[in-house]
Image (tube, rainbow, N blue to C red):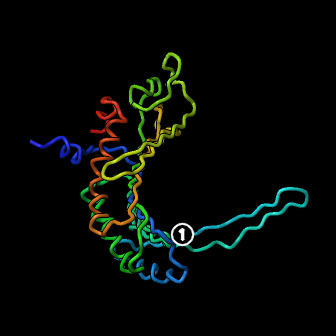
Amino acid sequence: MMSADEQQRNFHLDNAPIVEAVISIKLAEQLPATSLPDLEECSITISNSYPLRDPILAQQVQITIGIGGASNVETPTLLGFFCKEPSSHRVVHLKLDGFGFSELAPYSSWDSFFPAAQKAWAAYQSAVGASTIAGWSVRYINKISWPEQEPMEDYLNVHPNLPENRTQDLLGCFIRLQLSITDPSKGVFAQQVIRVPSLEQGKTSYVLDHEFSYSALGLTETELWRQIDQSRSTKNRYFQQSLTPKALEMYK
């Protein structure tokens, strides 16, 4: 018989409402622009799996307020590359300030998502060399929908406290919570609950956005990825606690 921790870790919904899953690793210092050819070379290295490449650009706009005010749009700055599968289902983020790996719906499983991210990170690290890592995060964005005449509290355990529980009448809702967490190390859990337009007639839809952020200072490579893997249980636990049994039943 599996322990409670093993059950938490292995929790899986066949029809999970995940819109996007992301693993991010942040460098302590941004790499110089001279590292862009290294990132480009990395994109070529992983092109068998991620052949589509798009630039990651940043642009600044300066606006002067007052009489005779003007605006100045600077030339976009190249920060790295997005490398995608032919279906764009999985995306590798090769950036001067760090690395990211994301998977869009339909989500596969942690046992598939996690090793793919680790493999792509190895290519990134090989390209840019050893760098101090400041932190890492795991983020899961879910979209939950239910019949529009039914109240929010029947499906989500995090909701506004309205008179007479009239949450089914909400036209807009944005809730953001930040909690201190200690598993798998000391970090921050950020939860956002946002009402979004529904693509289904007669349904109400909300985004349930969970991000778990941790420091990575002092961690070895092995410790970093061990902690990321351990966060699987944490993200599963917070997801289950955020939904009612009625909501979870919809996605089994």
Image quarter (top left, top right, bottom left or bottom right) of the N terminus: top left
Q: Give 30 or 78, whichever is nearer the viewer.
A: 30
Q: Residues within 10 Å of mark 1 (few under 14, many from 20)?
A: some
| Looking at the image, residue 201 lies above or below residue 114 | above
Q: How many marks?
A: 1
**Please, which residue is most extreme toward the left here?**
1
Residue 199 in sight here: no
Q: Give 143 or 192, whichever is nearer the viewer.
A: 192
| Looking at the image, residue 250 lies above or below residue 219 | above
**Please, which residue is most extreme toward the top here?**
164
**Please, which residue is most extreme toward the front here?**
218
Residue 112 in which image quadrant: bottom left
| Looking at the image, residue 17 lies above or below residue 105 | above
| Image point (30%, 52%), residue name | 184
| Image point (48%, 40%), residue name | 177
Please tell me whether mark 1 sits on a helix, a strand or a loop. Answer: strand
Residue 108 in which image quadrant: bottom left
Q: Which residue is mark 1?
A: 56
Residue 14 in which image quadrant: top left
**Please, which residue is most extreme toward the right here?**
67
Residue 92, given in percent of the width and then of the height, sits at: 41, 67
Residue 233, given in percent of the width and then of the height, sits at: 27, 48
Image quarter (top left, top right, bottom left or bottom right) of the C terminus: top left
